[in-house]
Structures are given as C-alpha cells and as structure tokens.
Amino acid sequence: MKITHVETHAVRIPLKPERRMVSSLGRHEVSEYVLVRIGTDAGIDGVGEATVMPRWSGETVWGCKALVDHLFAKVLVGCKVSDIAEIERRMEAVCKHNWFAKAAVEMACWDAWGKIVGRPVYDLLGGACRPLTFRCRFSMGAYDLDRARRTAAERVAAGFTTIKVKVGGEADDDLLRVRAVREVIGPELNLDIDANCGWSAETAIRKVKTLADCRLALVEQPTPDGDYEALARVRRETGAVIMADDMCFDFVHARELIRNQACDVINVYPGKQGGLARALRMVEFAASRGVACTIGSNLEWDVGTAAMGHLIVACPNMQVERYPGDSLGPIYHEFSIVQKPLPIIGPLVTVPSGPGLGIDVDWAAVRANACPST
Ligand SMILES: [Mg+2]
C-alpha cells in the first residue's frame, strides 16, 4: 500500500446567505479548500481536505497547493500510507507549520489505508468509544439583534441545546446580542460565547462579569493569540469555563496552556493540529493533565468534517457530551460535492461506518467548482 502519486484540487463553495459568518475576524461568505488525493499501488485512492482560512490560520489555497505539489508529493511517493509516523516525519523535514496542508495529506493516507484494509478510520485510531452519532452546538455569527433572535429561535426549534454566539471588539453591542439570545433560548439551554482573540484581558474580564446574569456555559478564546497569562487571568478573575482554540495549533501551545492553567477545555481539530495522529496525541496529553477537549471548526466541508467525527468517536477525551463542539461545516454551505453528503440532522452528526473516512467525493463537482484563482 505505497503512495504512487499525489494530486491537489482547489475548490470554492459559497456559504448559504443565512449561514454567512461574522466574527471579530471579519465576514466569511465563501470557503476555499484544497482536496488532496493520494493514489496507491493497491489501486485505491484516499482523500483529505485542507480547510484554509488565511485570516484565521495564515494558510491559503495557493500556498497549500504549492506545498503539497512541490514539496510533500516529492518526499511521500514510495511511503506506505499506513506508516503515519513516517509520513509526518517526511513532511516535517521539508516544511515547518502549515498544519492544514499537512493534515490534508495525512487525512488522505488514513482514508486510503482504511479503504485498503476495509476498516473505518475510527477503528484504525483505536476503536469506537462512543456512539457514531454525536451532538453539536450551533455557532452563530455576530449578527444584529433581530437576526440573532431569529436565528436562535430557529436553531432551538431544530433541536439544538447549546448555542454559541460570536463576540469580540471593544464596543458593547456584543453584550446586547448575548443577552438577546439568552432571552430567546430561555434559562435552561447552554449559551457559549466566542471572541476569536478579539478582547484584551481587561475587556474580557469586564464583559464576562457584566454577562453574569446570562449564565455563560463557556467562554471561547476571549484573549489574543500567544498570551497565555491573559487567558489565565480571565479564567482566574471571572471563574468562567475557558476554552482555548485560535491559539492552540502545536503541541507546545497545548503544553503552555496547561502549564499556565489558562483553560478548562481545548478545542481540537484534525486540520488545525496537522492531522489525526497529532490531534490524538494532543487530546491524550490533555487527558493526562485533566484537561478536556472537544471539536472545533473552520467550517470544514464533508471530508474534513468526517475526519473530525472519526477522532471524536475514537477518543474518550473528546468530551462532546459535556462540551458540544462545532462540526457542522457542511450545513453552512450552498451545496455538497460528495456522492452522499455526511448525515447531519439538526445538531446530530453521524460518522460513516464504511471503510476509510467513509466519504466518496464527486470529482466532477470538484472540477466544476474549481477555485478560479489557482
Ligand atoms: Mg473557535
């Protein structure tokens, strides 16, 4: 089961108008992805997804495609798809960082390996430790009050029990938004907020304390990237349950978050962590230090979302029951480019039990939606 060739396909999918995201990073109206297709001498392909979002991760479709085509493909041909450690080692040897690009390659290897041996990826990762269907929260953009109220009511009617609201910025309009959503969803359901690094420690502490009456279940990434002490201070001074996301890519970041007692939960995703194996190691390290993990998202498409699901199903410390995560990327987009879209009903995502990631890409649709600038 050796790698014979590596292809890349950049695609572009618009978000549904009603799902367009607004956060402290700006507006997200179109998603761009690079699909990596790995061929093997067994005649079976694997596919992985790089969910690139330059403002969030620094990676682009052009950079990702060039890296995979010109660096990774050259060192990976001849490598066994099941030798994930060697695949990681070869990519690390030729390129630092670029976690989403590396994850796409690694994900494609797990997919090909699973398809060749006829087993789902969660089985290769250690076996299912929870049901294949899991519950997500709904992540709402930083909308105006009317739209926030309307979206919250719709999503609760659709069965969601946790709503996350995007906040961030120095102005206090986000406090009104959070309060409006709490009024609409009633006192029982969970309400999370996510500032995407948009607040200083002082602003975060003031706003979280002001929102005490809203009984926030969780405060996600309130303070800037790289500032462990700021996050730890918000946690200490507000007593809120703190989730780290946008500042945790590498293992060193997870170690520093935990060493600084900066968070209660780490948001982990195969793309951000550079692959399923790296994500699994981070989740297990966090477990050994008593820190929970759950799933986070960059609005992945079906391949990336399936990979997230396999990690959740295989990993006890992906505590999605206690901290429902974000794994609904496909429902934000106008259309799907797989043969059979991932089953997502309201807040419930079901991980495919077929071989590999369990996703069959519609390559004609991929070509029809090629990213025009690549
Ligand atoms: Mg987040």
Image: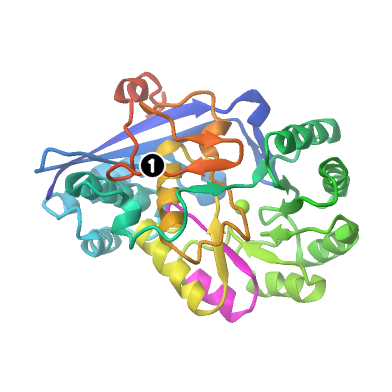
Colouring used for the render: rainbow
Residue lying furthest front = 131
Look at 40% across and 68% down and name the residue there. Answer: 281
Quarter of the image where one finds residue 26: top right
Does any atom of ligand 1 lie closer than 8 Å to the CB of label 1?
A: no
Quarter of the image where one finds residue 334: top right
Secondary structure of the residue carrying numbered label 1: loop
- What x and y, as percent, mark residue 338? 38, 28
Q: Which residue is mark 1?
A: 352
- What x and y, as percent, mark residue 90? 23, 60
Asked if 185 appears above or below 121 in the picture, the reply is above
The amino acid type of the residue labelled 1 equals: Pro
Inspect this view and state whether residue 71 appears: no
Residue 216 forms part of the magenta stretch: no
Q: Is residue 262 left or right of residue 290?
A: right
- What x and y, as percent, mark residue 208? 83, 61
Query: Which one is in front, 142 or 120?
Result: 120
Total numbered circles: 1
Look at 77% across and 50% down and name the residue there. Answer: 189
- What x and y, as percent, mark residue 33? 42, 36
Q: Is residue 6 left or right of residue 283?
A: left
Q: Is residue 274 left or right of residue 169?
A: left
Query: Which one is in front, 181 or 319?
Result: 319
Look at 85% across and 31% down and name the residue there. Answer: 146
Residue 254 forms part of the magenta stretch: yes
Look at 71% across and 71% down and name the residue there. Answer: 230
Count residues near mark 1 (Cα–Cα under 10 Å), then give few for <14, some for 14-19, many for 20+: many
Inspect this view and state whether residue 325 appears: yes
Q: Where's the C terminus, which quadrant?
A: top left
Residue span colored magenta: 252-272
